[in-house]
């Protein structure tokens, strides 16, 4: 322990160690309505509702793909928090941020970034509360969002028999990263559509809150760490096994995969920065939940079921093949 | 504008520009219970109380004086936010943070830092909610605190006739910075006491909340940017003049000043990182407010009065000498 560096322990390892200190010192963590490692934190309000709180940090050097505009970085720092709140059933109310700014950074770019924050707040009906600004070597935005929920959805409530569902198909962002990072090519129209999903993600805010408020959602998590990783986390938190009948691949990812002769399912499973919601629904409610999703202009794709056991598997009817738990992690070198 | 760098505009200049964008885009800033440039933000709760929110960033490279332990950095990131909330009358409820961590940083030190955060939360009765952890070149903590207030105190409510007061004397931290940055000497016992005020500041949480709840406080602000600067900001926000009858100098700063033959009043006025509350009180309530302060184990030192006009002056009975508005600002080279 004494000689380990942050990169040896990794983001998640450090966060787990932090919570073990907190539990030793405070011993109150079990009382939290959304205990670690859930996606956000919550406090009970006097009226019985929940105040849900989230912080997420966007660091330009590690989190902004090539070509991302500053306004898009600002926008994304709002979307990241809003998505986690929505996955817990909370309607975002207010956003504030601490920004780290290198002294030599062009002030025009900083204001473009904050312009992106403000217009995203506008888009999602969130109050912009400003914040702090300090000096750092990296340009970064530590975003903080609070929201209110009548009913919160944890990672841990899935039961055998529940239906596994997602709010949209996957694979656009990993196709875009293949273009941006590995310089793979794509026809201009496809390229534009894929890359836009990385530069301009949107959070399923209204849909997430509407679904949570029905009471039919038994567990839920946003998919920003990638579909496979999210499925594993959700299954582990609930102490169940997920068996997928299909991998939800987007039309554009299918097209990109067929051009490059790469497996489309891999693109959908091992991406990231895709802000859908992965959730489990009571078995008798999936039809009604899909109706709710349509009323909110969205979709709810049933992709499998919850079983006794552990792990995540893809079934073709006769055989079950395990889905690997790969995903992105800060501070971790692979 | 096009070619200006962050350091040319400075922290406060950038924050003012950000608010001008927000006002143009949202036009709602005037509706806020604590509008910019107040020390924290606020939202009205359904029960009529206020949710008060604050974010403040601690960057090791610029904000940690030589010799500060990691646990003390963590502690200070809590104190910074708690002090601002208390100055607005809000009792801190919960703290979370986004941490930036260099990949090669010893994980032991990171956990010491978080240990300091957690024990400070314990000390002030604040729930620790954890947060995010990402990779950055600087070790930094973006702290985020929420609290609840029955009654909030703005920077802008002082009226001519009010009494100007502070919750303690000043000068310890600037004496400590003379020792740490300019390597001035002091007898060991004095040195230890002064430096401790920089390494282990405490926020006037219970006192600030108790005073605000009386309804006698007309304006209030925490003094972390230095006494002189705080007085100027408070006078400007309220559109009044402050006339001090004395500069509240601490006993240890007097002792340090006399050793080095430097003016003690300068140490008290032009310091910073001193977490007292500067406030104005209705003229007939100062005695009662001082009783309240004593009940909370604190003090309330009357140091002057509020008059029509602008600026901050020190009066010796016959003449008034202006007090300069110097203070610390991030990103600004002086």
Image (tube, coloured by chain):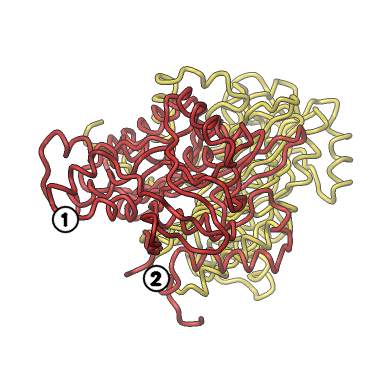
Chain colours: A yellow, B red
Q: Which residue is mark 2?
A: B7
Compare marks 2 and 1 and give the one earlier in the sequence: 2
Q: Residue at x 59, y 53 (%)?
A: B160
CB contact under 8 Å: marks 2 and 1: no
Quarter of the figure that contains the N terminus of chain A: top left
State whether residue B151 is above or below residue A200.
above
**x, y (%) of residue A175?**
59, 60
**x, y (%) of residue B242?**
49, 56
Dot 1 surroundings within 10 Å: few (below 14), some, or many (20 or more)? few
In terms of image quadrants, where is residue A122?
bottom right
Q: Residue at x 57, y 19 (%)?
A: A31
Question: Label 2, label 1: how many angstroms apart (C-alpha)?
Answer: 24 Å
Q: Which residue is mark 1?
A: B182
Mark 1 belongs to which subunit? Answer: B
Mark 2 belongs to which subunit? Answer: B
**x, y (%) of residue A308?**
65, 19
């Amino acid at each position: 322990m004494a000689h380990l560096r942050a990169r040896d322990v990794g983001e998640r390892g450090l966060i787990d160690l932090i919570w073990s200190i907190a539990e030793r010192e405070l011993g109150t963590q079990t009382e939290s309505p959304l205990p670690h490692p859930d996606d956000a934190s919550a406090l009970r309000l006097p009226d019985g509702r929940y105040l849900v709180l989230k912080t997420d940090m966007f660091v330009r050097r590690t989190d902004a793909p090539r070509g991302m505009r500053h306004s898009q970085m600002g926008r994304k720092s709002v979307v990241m928090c809003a998505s986690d709140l929505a996955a817990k059933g909370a309607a975002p109310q207010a956003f504030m941020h601490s920004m780290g700014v290198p002294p030599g950074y062009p002030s025009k770019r900083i204001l473009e970034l904050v312009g992106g924050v403000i217009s995203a707040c506008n888009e999602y009906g969130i109050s912009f509360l400003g914040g702090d600004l300090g000096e750092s070597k990296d340009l970064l935005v530590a975003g903080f969002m609070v929201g209110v929920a009548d009913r919160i959805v944890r990672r841990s409530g899935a039961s055998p028999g529940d239906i596994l569902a997602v709010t949209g198909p996957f694979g656009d962002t990993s196709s875009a990263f293949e273009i941006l990072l590995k310089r793979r090519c794509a026809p201009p129209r496809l390229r534009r559509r894929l890359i836009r999903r990385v530069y301009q993600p949107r959070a399923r805010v209204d849909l997430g809150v509407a679904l949570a408020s029905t009471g039919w959602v038994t567990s839920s998590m946003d998919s920003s760490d990638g579909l496979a990783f999210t499925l594993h986390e959700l299954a582990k938190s609930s102490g169940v096994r997920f068996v997928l009948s299909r991998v939800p691949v987007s039309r554009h990812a299918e097209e990109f995969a067929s051009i490059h002769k790469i497996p489309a399912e891999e693109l959908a499973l091992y991406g990231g920065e895709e802000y859908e919601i992965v959730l489990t629904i009571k078995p008798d409610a999936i039809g009604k939940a899909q109706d709710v999703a349509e009323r909110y202009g969205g979709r709810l794709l049933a992709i499998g079921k919850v079983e006794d056991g552990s792990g995540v598997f893809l079934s073709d009817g006769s055989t079950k093949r395990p889905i690997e738990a790969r995903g992105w992690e800060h501070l971790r070198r692979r």
